Image (cartoon, grey):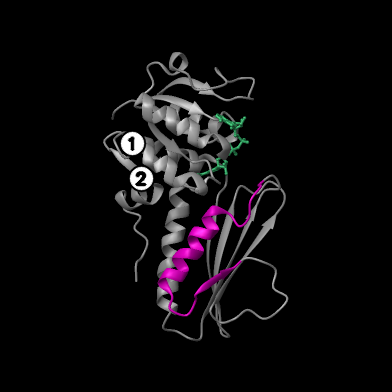
Amino acid sequence: MHFMNVLIVGYGNMGKEIEKILAERNHRVVARIDPVASDADAVALTAGVTKGADTAIEFSLASGVLQNAYFYSKAGIRAVVGTTGWADKLAEVKALFDGGGAFIHGSNFSIGAHLFIGLAQAASAVISNLPQYDIMMYEIHHKNKKDSPSGTALETAARILKANKNKKRIVTERLDRRPEPDELHVASVRGGAEPGQHCVIIDSIADTVEIRHRARSRAGFALGAVLAAEWLQKKQGFFTVEDFMIDIGIKGATP
Ligand SMILES: NC(=O)c1ccc[n+]([C@@H]2O[C@H](COP(=O)([O-])OP(=O)(O)OC[C@H]3O[C@@H](n4cnc5c(N)ncnc54)[C@H](O)[C@@H]3O)[C@@H](O)[C@H]2O)c1
């Protein structure tokens, strides 16, 4: 295996998980970058502090993603970005890697979560021709999560819609009415320390089938991000986490 020299960008909960997985897999941490964390090595990316790094793994805040991506593209550093909430900057970031470099991003780097999404999509395709069955979903996350529904819930919902001819729209708000037959209802619950739970329910008068992914900790996200960084070593271009998952065999089901 090619050993990586890594910058940990964002030294919060995920940055610390990433550090553990890098150590287990014998990669070297060049520096930990974080404007706030007191145990980081530097507050910002600079040529001096990033010297010797070939790869960055970033789980930080959306506000810094574009500026950091600009740095990676100029410095020729491969980047894995798990930060969420910067869809409005996607085109600008992508353009930075048109001429070279390697960048992969995604709102969920957990391999198990992608297996879940693939299974949900396959089940949605099957019930497309079974009018007895309806489909819906909910997700639960800890009390500090700032957005809802989760990126993973929205991705799962989009894949359910893609596979099912009866469902045309996602509704995430509280319903003070009956749902329309073409609506997929996605509910969010917030509280406690839950690292992330997603459940798709397929329901008929006779029975219920549940497909559930439940993260036990952040370790699964961190492992997926480090594996994606290893995968990226031989690549050039702009990728999503789905490209990586498909490449390692988690294809999901396309109807
Ligand atoms: N893609 C995934 O699989 C996945 C999994 C978990 C969390 N996330 C996302 O990752 C991000 C971080 O999550 P977390 O739980 O570690 O949050 P956290 O708040 O514990 O850590 C984020 C850290 O980033 C730092 N930071 C802010 N701006 C920065 C910048 N410009 N450069 C470097 N560091 C900066 C903050 O000071 C903080 O220490 C969030 O957007 C979260 O939604 C993604």
Q: Quadrant of residue 181?
A: bottom right
Q: Residue at x 61, y 47 (%)?
A: 195
Q: Residue at x 48, y 20 (%)?
A: 31
Question: What residue is disc 2 on?
Answer: 239
Nearer to us in this view, 36 or 123: 36
The reply to whether the magenta stretch includes residue 151 is yes
Residue 120 seen: no
Q: Are marks 1 and 2 in contact (CB under 8 Å)?
A: yes
Label 1: how many Cα within 10 Å (few below 14, some 14–19, many 20+): many
Q: How many marks on residues?
A: 2
> Label for residue 249?
none
Height in image: 102 above or below 209? above
Nearer to us in this view, 187 or 203: 187
Helix, strand or loop at disc 1?
strand
Q: Residue at x 56, y 63 (%)?
A: 199
Height in image: 66 above or below 178? above
Q: Which residues are magenta?
A: 145-171
Height in image: 118 above or below 17? below
Residue type pointed to by label 2:
Phe
In the picture, measured across the screen, residue 105 lies left or right of residue 154, that is left
Q: Position of residue 229 (x, y in %)?
A: 37, 35
Q: Quadrant of residue 16?
A: top right
Q: Position of residue 174 (x, y in %)?
A: 70, 68
In the picture, measured across the screen, residue 245 lies left or right of residue 144, that is left
Q: Position of residue 138 (x, y in %)?
A: 61, 64
Q: Tell me the quadrant of the picture where the C terminus can be found.
A: bottom left
Question: What residue is disc 1 on?
Answer: 102
- The mark that comes first in sequence, 1 or 2, is 1
Q: Position of residue 192 (x, y in %)?
A: 72, 48
Q: Is mark 1 within 8 Å of ligand 1?
A: no
Quarter of the rendered structure image containing ligand 1? top right
Q: Tell me the quadrant of the picture where the N terminus can be found.
A: top left
